[in-house]
Structure formats: structure tokens, C-alpha cells
Image (spheres, rainbow, N blue to C red):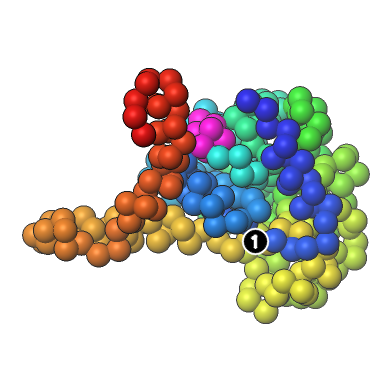
């Protein structure tokens, strides 16, 4: 399977003038639904990976193998370009290089490497950052690990909310200087902060969660924000739906009276059943 086309699509989003909202995806079903609804790309957050694969909170317990395998399942199910949250790259700079290789092989269109100290240090409740020099090494390692030059590598920092705005800018400029394809910021709390970051850098910006008053597409476009995340509501909706359905069954509701189930048409579309029927007719000699 070649993944070049999906990577080029993500590159064209970053190179364009629009600000798009990715669909939050985490498995074969969610990526196909996002594709069918016309989302330009998917975002595979570390938090949803932990939840979908392990049922755990976002505290760096998931392994690279598990993350890459889930990405591979999505890549098989759909050609929608996916940006993967690769956290801190699963170790030091050498691990980052390996992380990039694995996610590239799994079909990611792009990935983010962040300068957060993960997993959490002993006796320290607050989120900490690794030194800038180590962050730069991780970005270099990510770029070096790339086999397909079309794979998008984003340097990510949450410094604005952890150390300072100046530190966020310093880090972003350093990552820019080593050649990452774009900058991903979390923890931006005001227009003034975003404007300062945008003025001090030149690469396309991807924005993690931001307050509502900033999250206006026209405004973001003007600040060079090309992708703006909107959280991970789909997995939350799915959790509630499974909860409600199981509770109703447990309370004795007959299956035919259950509310909110996918229609057979929707399920069939998600399963790409028509394609499978055609294939069965061709290959197994079955009547459609
Ligand atoms: O990448 C994102 O969508 C935000 C994030 O860090 C996560 O959800 O783990
Ligand atoms: Mg994350």
C-alpha cells in the first residue's frame, strides 16, 4: 500500500490558506465515518488512542506498538489522511526516530512530536518540559527517521501554558530552524498569545484546544493556523451510546426497542458492504 497521496493531501492543507477542522478518529469505524462525512483529514489524539486501545487516561501507558497497530488498522480501512499525536516520541531522540519509522509504515500522513517530559516524573505533579536542546534533538531525529519525504513532521510544544509565551516562541523557532514542516501549539489562552507566536514564526500552525473566542475560522486563517482541533467528542459520544445501550439491555429493554442504534444502511456503508458483495460475486462466484 502506498501512503504518498494522503501525505500530499495533508501537505496541501498546511500549504493552503484555509483553516480546517479535523475529524477525531480512533478506529476503523470512526475513520470511515469521518471520510464519508467529507472531513479533509483525521486527528488521532494520544488521549483517544489510550482510551480506545487500553481504556486508560492519557498518561503515556500505551506503547508504540499499540499506537502504530491502531494507526495501521485505520490506514487499511480508509485513505483519509491522519495526523497522529506521537506524544514525546516514546522515549529519547533515538526512540523518536524509531517512532517515526513505525508510524510511517503504519500509514500516518503526519505526526507530532512534543517537548513534554513524559511519562510524569517522580514526585512532580506539574507538567514539565524537556530542555530546548533535547527538544531540538528530537525534531532532528524525527526528520532523520522519515523514509518518505512526504510524511509530515510537526514540532509541538505546550510551553505557553507550562513555562512562558517567550519560551514557547523560543522553542518553536528552534524547531523551525531544524526543518520541521509545521508547528503545533497547545495551551494558547488568548488572541494576543497566538498573534505573538504567529508573528515570531513562519511555518504553518496547528492549534490544539483553544478558548472559544480564538476558535473563529476567519481569525485563525489570518494567523496562519491551517488546522484547528476541536477536541475528541466522537469517542465521548460513542462511550455514552454504549453505556446507554448496555444499561437499557441490563434493565430489560428488548433489543427491538433500543434507541439510537445505527441503521442497517449506515452499518452497511461503514462496512463497505457493497464492495465486499461485488468482490464476493467476482471471486467466490456468489450471486449479488
Ligand atoms: O492531539 C490532540 O488531539 C490533543 C492531545 O494531545 C490528545 O488528545 O492527546
Ligand atoms: Mg496528546
Residue 137 position in % (x across, y down): 79, 35
Q: Does residue 31 appear anywhere in the picture?
A: yes
Q: Position of residue 46 (x, y in %)?
A: 55, 46
Helix, strand or loop at label 1? It is loop
Q: Residue furthest top?
A: 284
In terms of image quadrants, where is residue 283? top left
Q: Residue at x 90, y 56 (%)?
A: 202
Which of 87 and 124 lies nearest the eye of the viewer?
Answer: 87
Height in image: 4 above or below 284? below
Question: Would you place residue 66 above or below residue 219 in this image?
Answer: above
The C terminus, quarter of image: top left
Q: Position of residue 238 (x, y in %)?
A: 38, 56
In the rendered image, residue 72 lying in the magenta stretch gets the answer yes
Q: Position of residue 167 (x, y in %)?
A: 80, 58
Left or right of 25? Residue 80 is right
Residue at figure coordinates x 51%, y 58% from the top left: 232
Front residue of 187 and 41:
41
Q: Main secondary structure of the magenta part?
A: helix
Residue at the limit of the structure toward the bottom, as seen here: 213
40 on left or right of 44 = right
Residue 37 covered by magenta stretch? no
* Up/down of 76 relative to 199, above or below: above
Depth check: 234 or 127 in front?
234
How many numbered tags mark residues here? Answer: 1
On the question of residue 120 being in view, the answer is no
Q: Residue at x 11, y 58 (%)?
A: 254
> Over which residues does the magenta segment extend?
69-77
In the displayed structure, does residue 266 sit left or right of residue 227? left
Residue at screen point 44% across, 55% down: 235
Quadrant including the N terminus = top right
Residue corresponding to mark 1: 21
Dot 1, how many residues are within 10 Å of its Cα: few (below 14), some (14-19), or many (20+)? some
Amino acid at each position: 500500500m502506498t501512503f504518498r497521496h494522503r501525505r500530499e493531501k495533508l501537505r496541501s492543507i498546511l500549504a493552503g490558506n484555509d483553516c480546517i477542522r479535523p475529524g477525531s478518529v480512533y478506529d476503523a469505524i470512526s475513520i470511515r465515518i469521518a471520510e464519508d462525512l467529507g472531513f479533509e483529514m483525521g486527528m488521532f489524539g494520544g488521549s483517544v488512542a489510550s482510551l480506545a486501545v487500553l481504556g486508560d487516561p492519557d498518561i503515556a501507558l500505551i506503547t508504540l506498538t499499540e499506537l502504530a497497530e491502531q494507526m495501521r488498522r485505520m490506514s487499511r480501512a480508509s485513505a483519509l489522511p491522519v495526523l497522529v499525536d506521537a506524544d514525546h516520541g516514546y522515549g529519547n531522540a533515538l526512540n523518536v526516530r524509531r517512532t517515526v519509522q513505525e508510524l510511517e509504515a503504519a500509514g500516518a500522513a503526519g505526526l507530532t512530536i512534543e517537548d513534554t517530559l513524559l511519562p510524569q516524573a517522580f514526585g512532580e505533579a506539574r507538567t514539565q518540559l524537556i530542555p530546548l536542546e533535547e527538544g531540538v534533538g528530537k525534531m532532528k531525529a524525527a526528520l532523520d527517521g522519515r523514509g518518505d519525504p512526504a510524511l509530515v513532521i510537526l514540532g509541538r510544544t505546550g510551553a505557553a501554558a507550562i513555562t512562558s509565551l517567550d519560551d514557547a516562541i523560543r522553542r518553536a523557532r528552534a524547531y523551525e530552524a531544524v526543518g520541521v514542516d509545521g508547528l503545533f501549539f497547545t495551551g494558547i489562552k488568548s488572541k494576543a498569545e497566538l498573534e505573538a507566536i504567529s508573528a515570531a514564526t513562519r511555518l504553518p500552525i496547528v492549534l490544539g484546544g483553544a478558548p472559544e473566542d480564538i476558535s473563529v475560522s476567519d481569525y485563525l486563517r489570518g494567523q496562519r493556523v491551517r488546522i484547528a482541533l476541536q477536541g475528541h467528542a466522537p469517542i465521548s459520544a460513542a462511550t455514552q451510546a454504549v453505556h446507554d445501550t448496555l444499561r437499557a439491555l441490563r434493565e430489560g429493554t428488548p433489543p427491538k426497542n433500543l434507541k439510537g442504534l445505527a441503521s442497517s444502511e449506515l452499518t452497511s456503508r461503514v462496512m463497505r458492504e457493497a464492495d465486499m458483495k461485488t468482490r464476493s460475486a467476482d471471486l467466490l462466484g456468489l450471486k449479488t
